[in-house]
Amino acid sequence: MHPPKDDRYQAIHSAFAWHVPEFFNMAQACAQRWAQRRGAGARVAVIDQADLSAAAQQLSFAALYQQALQLSGALQAHGVEQGERVAIVLPQRAETAVAYMATMGMGAVAMPLSQLFGADALRFRLQDSAAVAVLADASTWPAVAAVLEDCPTVRLALVLDDTRATAGPGVHVAAWQRTVDQALPGTWIATRADDPAVLIYTSGTTGNPKGALIPHRALLGNLTGFVCSQNWFGFDPVRGTLHGPEGLPAEPLVPTVFWSPADWAWTGGLMDALLPTLYFGRPIVAFRGRFSAQAAFELLQRHRVTHAFLFPTALKAMMKAYPNPRQHMTLHLQAIMSAGEALGDTVFGWCEQALGVTPNEMFGQTEINYIVGNCAMNGARSVVGWPARPGSMGRGYPGHRVAVIDEHNQPCPPGVPGEVAVHRLDVHGHPDPVFFLGYWRNPQATAAKYSGDWCRTGDMAVADAEGYLWYHGRADDMFKSAGYRIGPSEIENCLLAHPDVANAAVVPKPDAERGAVVKAYVVLAEHARSARQAAADAMAWDRALQTALQALVKDRLAPYEYPKEIEWIDALPMTTTGKVQRRVLRERETALAHNMT
């Protein structure tokens, strides 16, 4: 099969070359340089929509930079230094963007923590990172305050919307706005491109979550994927440039507004939405409300959103609620990127027909983000770079040498399954800036991520003759549910904390809406088995314990991690060395789902 005439992939990929400066800072690129341009006071950076009943507030690039300087000054006045970790526990709001800019601009390391995290998840990350400061608001502060006595390195907490927030001895707690107003502007530094900017914890299959340390240059490494998947302005892929005159991103020909429900504490929300949008000097919508199809379409209309990152779960919900939205709505969408799981033909077709946009599916992970995807423009798969194929992960984005490799680090022939991997060097032999620096204080795990010059993703795929990748599943026990990356180990450890649980294994159960849901196989402790047998109503006993276990995970970890289904099992399948064979349970769930269809 020959590529279509409008397929520009080879020309784009071979022409592109990286130009990474020695000194580069994400905050200076996303805020300072735009604030110093004429008209910065009128150029909108963040459209803050607290809830749909309130009027939106706008934060200009000039205000973003000024507020970030003031926050940097407050942090520096309390002793926060370059390289130290600052935890950001905030929902989507204007101050969250300010927090990232302030932290990274002064050379400290921003550590995003989800507003959904419970006590155990927060405690581990604050302890492991040795964070020195926490930035929170009234919605997230209670959970943070509950664990601070176990986090001795934290010495400062700034809290929005709660002027009476307090904590135990050793932590200076202050009202964010009052403290910032009283501070002198801080000092931003010229960080090297290889200096650390962000520390994001990612769940694994064994042990505790690992902190992926992301350098400032990684934002540049994300940009080719962003502009291709969003059909973005200011990018001439054939000439291999991401910049316009004076080294700045080129101005769009039409107004552009970005929105994604992805939490800015996750790689998808931070590196695929917030930072690249600000890098190109365009506004992003911040919404603190709960996602719903109605809210999504209201935001798209109200703010004339042109570009979006929407998980398959979100698009499925929108499709079911509004099969023909343009019959009674005015939409301005020009591009949609989707990631986390395959869209499927039905949702893909709905996006094209009902929204008028060909969705560009993308693949990446925290350590090496935005590496594979599609680049088709809106409307019946018309092409900007290369056609989008429903269900395909896409092709390696410009600047990334991506392959499906075998156990010997050799590319697999078309049609042969292997592991998706990215080479340290691009097709021209130059270093790829997208790579993370390593796992925080975990050199063994960092070394295990690489096979020679290939960084392995742990995801299995097949490449076809034209270089499109087709997902086959994880090489380990990781899985995704509704776009969230799930590591079984944390959930299993949480379940084991309950006295009635002797052992547990967590696996994905196929689900049409979410791709998969979390299912736990639980071995009851001996006393719990006896109590269940003696119970007058075994079903009621089961429901009570299941509810308690679900609540335990919701409280300690996060709501999206709780097992929606729990099954008692006499014994877990084990290897001869005593390791749980989650693969056996996964295959069982897949077979059961197949038999039900």
Image (cartoon, grey):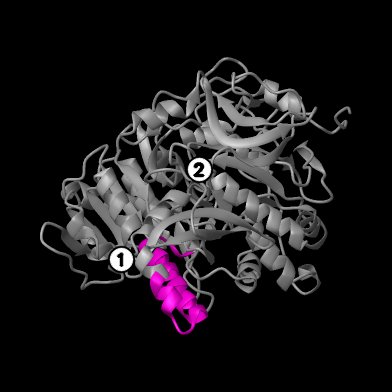
Q: Position of residue 436 (x, y in %)?
A: 44, 32
Is residue 217 shown in magenta? no
Q: Position of residue 170 (x, y in %)?
A: 11, 57
The segment highlighted magenta reads 530-559
**Mark identifier at residue 279:** 2
Residue for point 31% across, 71% down: 161
Measured along the vertical axis of the image, is residue 7 above or below residue 559? Answer: above
What residue occupies the far top of the structure in this picture? 429
SS for callout 1: helix
Q: Is residue 249 left or right of residue 523?
A: right
Is residue 556 shown in magenta? yes
Residue 2 versus residue 329: which sits nearer the camera? Answer: 2
The disc labelled 1 sits on which kind of residue? Ala
Residue for point 28% across, 44% down: 129
Residue 53 versus residue 65: which sits nearer the camera? Answer: 53
Mark 1–mark 2 distance (CA, rounded to whole Å): 32 Å
Q: Is residue 229 left or right of residue 475?
A: right
Give the mark toward the camera: 1 or 2. 1
Q: Residues within 10 Å of mark 2 (few under 14, many from 20)?
A: many
Identify the image quadrant of residue 354. bottom right
**Mark identifier at residue 476:** none
Measured along the vertical axis of the image, is residue 441 above or below residue 388? Answer: above
Q: Which residue is mark 1?
A: 143
Count of numbered marks? 2
Mark before the other along the chain sequence, 1 or 2:
1
Q: Main secondary structure of the magenta part?
A: helix
Q: Quadrant of the N terminus?
A: top right
